[in-house]
Amino acid sequence: MNSRQFLIRDLLVLLAFTGWALALPHYASEFAVSMALTCLMYVALSTSWGLFCGSTRYLSLATSAFFGIGAYSSALLLAEYGWVQSILMGAGAAVVVALIMGAAVLHLRGTYFAVLTFGMTELIMHAVTYFEKKVSGTVGRVLTVVPERDTIYLTVLALAVLSVLLSIIVRRNRFGLALMGIGADEQRAQTLGLNTRLIKIIGFAMTAAFAGAIGAAMAVRWTYIDPHTVFNPFIGFQTVLIALIGGAMTLWGPLIAAIVFSVLAETLRLEFPQIYMMSLGLLLILSVLYLPGGLASLRGETFRGWWQDSRQWWRQLGKSEAKEGGHV
């Protein structure tokens, strides 16, 4: 298949996914729609995260910071402005913070970058908590204006589809190639004339825009929000896990993993939270050891390779046991 055929295939798959998601609220139960809403949230978060972090290999742990900024923007502005304006302002506020954060820390890589983005997330959460206590005299916000369920669902669906569509476009243009070049060899990309710092900041801001918009849309589900809820590090960690297990450098990996994780979350997290967390860790370990390309890299050859490796392992084990028996 050539690049044009791959593009048509990806667009048709996205169209089919959109059609299925649009039809879901008309025949599914409230529980199924709620689970689908969570799934779409993580599709948007993990796809946008993978677009920047998967391509550049920068491990950002700031997703929950942008999510919380968007949620608080929605809580503060929704009563005065409209729904769409609140979503856009939440995305805009997250982008502003991302530009400042990116300019400060994107010259670092690896563990240093990951730790600093996590530290800045905690700093933002405690700064918002301090402001709420000292200035507002409260710890959280009550959302008095709440849109209908279908409005929230369609908004999150639109953001999820937009994130996948943007990923399809970016992966095929010069900006996407620049991001991949930074991930492959940043110094060589600089010698070729790329302004790597600017490219990284723009990519980081794109990720923040989706996280802020999703936070603004999802905040109304809770009717009451506080810093520890919307800046919860678990949101960022689960986004990273979904992207890595699905395949951060692939287009459909985050979407596949988001569906798997949403089903696991709804079936295990409430009744068996320990088993749920163990499942996350086990999936991550197995993915890193045996499927470094993520779930999206699964092919028939992958299973055949596993089968051949297991047979070879059993043969070697049988030979070693036979040798030990002969020595005895």
Image (tube, rainbow, N blue to C red):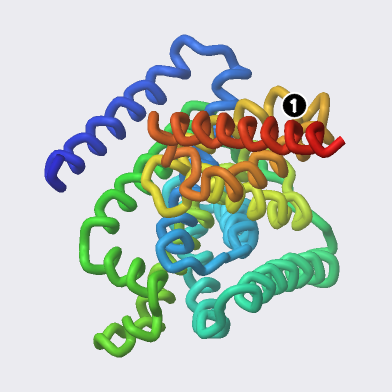
Residue drawn at the location 77% of the way across and 39% of the way down: 277
Q: Residue furthest top?
A: 27
Quadrant of the rendered image containing residue 188: bottom left
Horizontal relation, residue 176 to residue 132: left or right: left
Horizontal relation, residue 57 to residue 110: left or right: left
Residue situated in front as seen by the camera: 207 or 282: 282
Image coordinates of residue 103 in percent, x first then y, are 50, 83
Q: Residue furthest right?
A: 328
Looking at the figure, which quarter contains the C terminus?
top right
Residue drawn at the location 52% of the way across and 44% of the way down: 291
Residue drawn at the location 57% of the way across and 12% of the way down: 29
Q: Is residue 76 visible?
A: no
Please tell me how crowded label 1 is: few (under 14), some (14-19), or many (20+) other residues with Cα within 10 Å: some
Residue situated in front as seen by the camera: 58 or 321: 321
Image coordinates of residue 67 in percent, x first then y, are 59, 55
Question: In the displayed structure, would residue 33 be above or below residue 316?
Answer: above
Residue situated in front as seen by the camera: 181 or 199: 181
Q: Is residue 112 visible?
A: yes
| Secondary element at image label 1 | helix
Q: Which residue is mark 1?
A: 268
Question: In the displayed structure, would residue 287 be above or below residue 180?
Answer: above
Question: In the displayed structure, would residue 112 be above or below residue 13?
Answer: below
Q: Amino acid at mark 1?
A: Leu
Horizontal relation, residue 67 to residue 9: left or right: right
Looking at the figure, which quarter contains the N terminus?
top left
Question: In the displayed structure, would residue 47 be above or below residue 5?
Answer: below
Q: Residue furthest front?
A: 327
Residue situated in front as seen by the camera: 323 or 194: 323
